[in-house]
Image: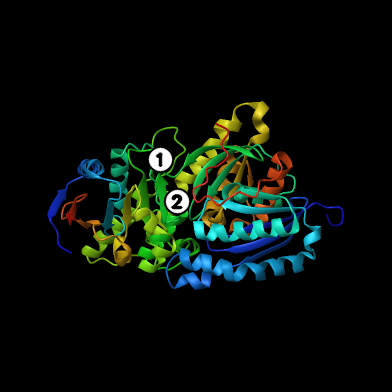
Amino acid sequence: MEFKRIIEIRNEDDTRAFGLALAEEALPGTVYALIGDLGTGKTTLTKSIAEGLGIERHITSPTFTIVQEYREGRLPLFHFDVYRLRNAEDLFEIGADEYFYGRGVCVVEWADLVMEALPEDTKFICIDYAEEENGRVYKCTF
Amino acid sequence: MKDGKFITMAFESSCDETSVAVLADGREVWANVISSQIDIFKQYGGVVPEIASRHHLENINRVVDQAMEEAKVTWKDIDLIGVTMGPGLVGALLMGVATAKAAAFAHDIPLVGVHHILGHISANYIEYPELKPPFMALVTSGGHTNIIDVEDYNRCRVLGATRDDAVGEAYDKVARVLGLGYPGGPKMDKLAKEGNPDAIPFKRVYLEKDSYDFSFSGLKTAVLNYLNTEKQAGREVNKADVAASFQQAVMDVIVDKSVGAVLERYGNDPAKSAGKKLVLAGGVASNTKLRAMLEDACAKKGIELFRPSPILCTDNAAMIGCSAYYKYKEFGADSMDMDAYPSLPLPDVE
């Protein structure tokens, strides 16, 4: 994976600003793939993307339902958490292609588990812990 | 009808259990067959939806046969078919809905779609034949964390919900980090008994004053941070203490908020005192710590506490049949174009 940008995130305000910018850039069919360990703030970043799209509802974890739909914003948001899937094939089975190649924005948490199922132009964000507390490093392929 | 009683058959397949039940007069369980798939899922550390729908398909006819055999009924005895229509995994839900529709159509039996959460709450009507709404319900499971004011059998008001992870999900994630395996809830509950709940001061997350909402994501992160810090310092982690401290931080908030909701809604006005009841539902209602803490807190505040037996706390079709019975009595049958809705909202009064 080739990274075009490396962004240092100091706190949740930085996360929010980045998420709002992603929402602004998003087009129908944009897929943001998030890769990072438990607790690195994947859902927190998704919340900011949702906010930027004009979605006011709480973004709850889709771990249980795999995908959660929000259709009230500028573009529909499809929030995936594929933590419980084994591989890309499982994602096909639940009809993910219809979301990926549809008219909305997709955010996929734990994307590393389903790499082969993601569209070619997927925008990856790899999230690491930074040295300082609450800090994160976002490595982006776009 | 059989023996002068109204017979309901119900299907539940919203997640990892395929279940079929037969009930008489809405509350009397004649059969409640649950084909537990937990063994298959253990190796993957969670529910695998694709496997789930395939297994529902493989199981369901066998489960139907067994339920009818146990209940000693035939298709012509059945007056109503109930089925979970949501929320849940779409592929899994569809297996139940398609089977229920096929049976209803083939045997000309009325069909009713049920909300999974109302089903969980209805488990209490089975356990306690005298229980009637209104009351406050605390619904906690792998996918849900809600405080719900149940005004009537088919009407409720959601006072509080999780803003991020469901409580059972937080348990599963922390259990996974601690290397305990799936399902995380019962294993954490067991391990926590050996630990000191005051060992690690994890923050209690109450959100805004007067809010009945929950947030467990930060607590999950706090556990991770604690484990990382200890690891970097080269200190041995006492897993039982982590489990006990995590559990205490979760339950303190759940108990405070649910007891607070009962008192606010039903505790002050003597005219409303009939509702001064707290009704537990969902898988986490089997947690021994939650039960013990609520028993204590409710006794102190004069609140009557209702807890279904563990089998009725898991996903089962008997609770769906009970809920279907009360929905049918009020609203009649659903049409045959009824469908599965993965994010079905509750029938909120507002």
Does residue B42 lie above or below A71 as drawn?
below
Task: Say whether residue B156 is visible.
Answer: yes
Q: For this rendering, which residue is in front, B205 or A103?
A: A103
Q: Position of residue B38 (x, y in %)?
A: 52, 69
* Cβ atoms at labels 2 and 1 below 8 Å apart: no
Residue name at image x 71 percent, y 39 percent: B330
Horizontal side of residue B163 vs B132, given as left or right? left
Horizontal side of residue B93 vs B1, given as left or right? left
* Sequence-wise first label, 2 or 1: 2
Residue type indicated by callout 1: Tyr
Classify mark 1: helix, strand or loop.
Answer: loop
Number of the label disc, if any, that sits on residue B166: 2
Q: Position of residue B155 (x, y in %)?
A: 62, 37
User: Local crowd at mark 2 within 10 Å, few (<14), some, or many (≥20)?
Assistant: many
- Judging from the image, mark 1 belongs to the subunit labelled B
Q: Position of residue B114 (x, y in %)?
A: 62, 49
Q: For this rendering, which residue is in front, B255 or B48?
A: B48
- Quadrant hosting residue B97: bottom right
Q: For this rendering, which residue is in front, B40 or B112?
A: B112
Tally of marks = 2
Number of the label disc, if any, that sits on residue B206: 1
Find the distance from the CA under tag 2 to the CA under tag 1: 15 Å
Q: Position of residue B219 (x, y in %)?
A: 36, 51
Classify mark 2: helix, strand or loop.
Answer: loop
Residue type indicated by callout 2: Ala
Task: Say whether residue B197 is visible.
Answer: no
